[in-house]
Image: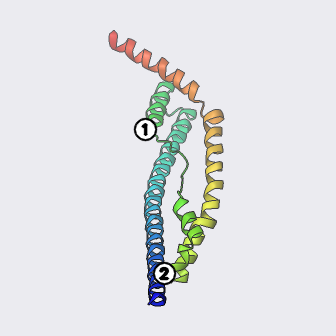
Amino acid sequence: MLFAAVTLGFFAENIREHQVIDNHKNQNLIAMIDDLKQDSVQINKRIDEYSNSLIRFEKMKDLSFGFSHQEINENQLIDSVVKTYLNTTFSVALFINNASYKNTISSGSLSFIKNNETKKLIAEYYEALYGKLVVNNTLLDNDYNEFVGKTFDLVLLLNQLKNYLSKQDQAQIR
């Protein structure tokens, strides 16, 4: 009788332990799916922001070209560049949250995914593409700092904007 009780207790504990492991596995995989969905939203948002920024920078380049070919005057250039620049959104680099993936790996939950192609794609996303993203974020930050610091002097632009707005205000007062 004692042997049967101990044996049943052992089996019950084993079943409970498997249920806990399955529950953790499911939680880890659900968290990873949620992270992937959020990543997808952020990636699409960044693509839209970067595309719109490129269009605006192209417009500023065209304005500069027009000014250099005397198609527009200095005030038109300043007015148009300021309006374009103020409507341009600058985003922070893209951040991908890989905490749930790391947790899934460390807990062994990834091994519960039966489809090898799915496991391969997840690993490629978090291992290969994540590394490339870190490098791209660094390049983006460097390019942005160079652009703002050297090519497109924000302080100079803001001073020109202040002067332009002050001239506009004086013109309205008259």
The amino acid sitting under disc 1 is Asn
The number of numbered discs placed on residues in the rendered structure image is 2
Query: For mark 2, what is the residue?
Result: 14
* Residue 2 image position (x, y, % from top left): 46, 87
- Give the camera-side residue of 69 and 15: 15
Marks 2 and 1, how far apart at CA = 62 Å
- Which numbered mark, 2 or 1, is in the foreground of this view? 2
Corner quadrant of residue 127: bottom right
Quadrant occupied by the N terminus:
bottom left
- Residue visible at 61% across and 48% down in the picture: 140
Relative vertical location of residue 137 with respect to residue 66 in this rendering, above or below = below
Q: Which mark is residue 144?
A: none
In the rendered view, would you say 11 is above or below 94? below
SS at mark 1?
A: loop
Look at mark 1 in the image and give the residue it sits on.
Answer: 87
Across and down, in percent, residue 8 comes to: 44, 86
Say few, some or many: other residues with alpha carbon within 10 Å of mark 1 (under 14 / 14 to 19 / 20 or more): few
Q: Nearer the viewer, residue 25 or 16?
A: 16
SS category of the residue bearing label 2 = helix
Residue at 45% from the left image edge and 33% from the top image edge: 80
Q: Could you tell me the amino acid type at mark 2?
A: Asn
Q: Position of residue 147 (x, y in %)?
A: 62, 39
Q: Is residue 45 left or right of residue 96?
A: left
Classed neighbour count for the residue bearing mark 2: other residues with Cα under 10 Å, few (<14), some (14–19), many (≥20): few
Q: Residue at x 51, y 83 (%)?
A: 115
